[in-house]
């Protein structure tokens, strides 16, 4: 009799717990460090909008842009501590958690965003979304922000032209090595601190996309922009694994569907916005553009090739090889 009663109580508790999980409203705090009018900022807002339309009462989303909650030196720890539940850091930020994602930082590896996208959609690229699973981080999607350009206080035509300058970088061993190869100093600092460092003269250059260069008004201090397209500034939309898998399957499946839709829109908008912001910067009259012909671009690539060799073992020959195969399909 006691065993029967215990079984019934356990069954009732199971049903009650399941019912509670279905009725619970899950709060997703989405923190990021850029302006709301950038591709990532717009993607976060679109995600919130779609969740409110389709999952009202089940999921609530709060957006914290412009490092208003955590800056980019603190946000990953905040995710692990479940103080935020969703981030979209640039891929360079993940090197402490997995060396494999450093493939996206290798300078002059990818020719354009289309090559990056082909690699991300390949089996190896999709596999990299799970590269931080053991650290409790689940990758949900790749969000694009465009190819990186060099902005500096003087024109950079040849690789040697960067020697002696200090460049703000995201914390990344690969990017640090990239500037060391140019004879330049790499200064790691949060994205939000860059404008003050430029005004103070602490740095004389940076690398970023057209949309970020425009939205942050870097051209006030850095009037020389070299259109290098030397790297891809992509983001990985990530979540706290424990939080993510605590969401009921049906709700989580709908969230994954929403993320797929938002990712498509973010990546399309990123290409359009970067092109538009490029034109705005050049039309403003303050930016002086340096373009690279094929021979000069090859000289930059050759100057950077030792960086590929330096990190090949860490990243993995299989990962770099898969990236190169994606690139060759367009050459």
Image (tube, rainbow, N blue to C red):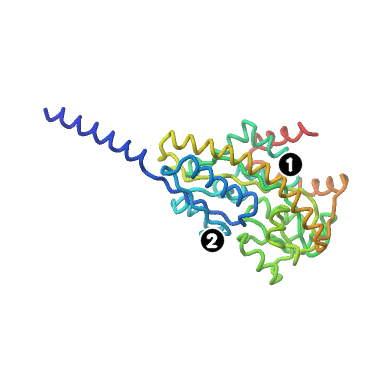
| Few, some or many residues within 10 Å of mark 1 (<14, 14–19, 20+) | many
Above/below status of 256 relative to 232: above
Task: Report the front residue among 178 and 258.
Answer: 258
**Which quadrant would the N terminus be assigned to in this image?**
top left
**Which quadrant would the C terminus be assigned to in this image?**
top right
Task: Report the front residue among 182 and 31.
Answer: 31
The x and y percentages for residue 4 are 16, 27
In the orientation shown, which residue stands out farthest toward the left? 1
In the orientation shown, which residue stands out farthest toward the front? 53
Q: Residue at x 53, y 61 (%)?
A: 68
Horizontal arrangement in the rendering, residue 72 relative to residue 285 (left or right): left
Task: Report the front residue among 62 and 198.
Answer: 62
Q: Earlier in the sequence, mark 2 or mark 1?
A: 2
Mark linked to residue 153: none
Mark 1 secondary-structure assignment: loop
Residue under label 2, please give it. 68
Q: Give the mark toward the camera: 2 or 1.
A: 2
Quadrant of res 104? top right
The x and y percentages for residue 196 are 65, 68
The x and y percentages for residue 135 are 48, 44
Mark 2 secondary-structure assignment: loop
How far apart are the alpha carbons under marks 2 and 1?
A: 33 Å
The x and y percentages for residue 69 are 51, 59
| Few, some or many residues within 10 Å of mark 2 (<14, 14–19, 20+) | few
Q: Are marks 2 and 1 in contact (CB under 8 Å)?
A: no
Total number of numbered labels? 2
Residue under label 1, please give it. 110
Task: Report the front residue among 111 and 61.
Answer: 61
Above/below status of 129 relative to 41: above
Q: Residue at x 64, y 49 (%)?
A: 39
Q: Residue at x 67, y 65 (%)?
A: 195
């Amino acid at each position: 009799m006691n065993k029967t009663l215990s079984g019934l109580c356990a069954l009732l508790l199971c049903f009650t717990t399941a019912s509670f999980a279905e009725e619970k409203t899950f709060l997703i705090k989405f923190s990021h460090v850029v302006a709301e009018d950038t591709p990532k900022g717009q993607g976060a807002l679109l995600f919130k909008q779609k969740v409110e339309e389709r999952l009202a009462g089940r999921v609530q989303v709060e957006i914290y842009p412009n490092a208003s909650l955590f800056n980019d030196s603190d946000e990953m720890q905040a995710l692990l501590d479940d103080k935020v539940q969703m981030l979209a850091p640039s891929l360079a930020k993940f090197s402490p958690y997995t060396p494999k994602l450093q493939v996206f930082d290798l300078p002059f590896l990818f020719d354009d965003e289309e090559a990056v996208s082909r690699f991300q959609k390949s089996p190896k690229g999709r596999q990299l979304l799970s590269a931080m699973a053991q650290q409790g981080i689940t990758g949900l999607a790749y969000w694009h922000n465009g190819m990186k350009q060099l902005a500096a206080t003087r024109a950079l035509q040849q690789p040697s032209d960067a020697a002696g300058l200090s460049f703000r970088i995201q914390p990344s061993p690969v990017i640090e090595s990239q500037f060391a190869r140019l004879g330049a100093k790499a200064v790691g600092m949060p994205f939000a601190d860059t404008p003050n460092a430029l005004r103070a003269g602490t740095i004389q250059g940076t690398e970023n996309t057209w949309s970020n260069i425009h939205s942050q008004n870097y051209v006030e201090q850095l009037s020389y922009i070299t259109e290098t397209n030397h790297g891809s500034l992509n983001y990985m939309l990530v979540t706290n694994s424990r939080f993510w898998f605590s969401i009921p399957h049906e709700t989580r499946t709908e969230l994954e569907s929403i993320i797929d839709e938002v990712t498509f829109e973010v990546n399309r908008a990123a290409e359009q916005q970067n092109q538009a912001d490029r034109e705005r910067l050049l039309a403003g009259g303050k930016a002086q553009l340096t373009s690279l012909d094929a021979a000069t671009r090859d000289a930059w690539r050759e100057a950077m090739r030792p960086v590929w060799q330096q990190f090949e073992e860490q990243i993995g020959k299989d990962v770099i090889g898969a990236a190169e195969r994606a690139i060759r399909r367009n050459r």
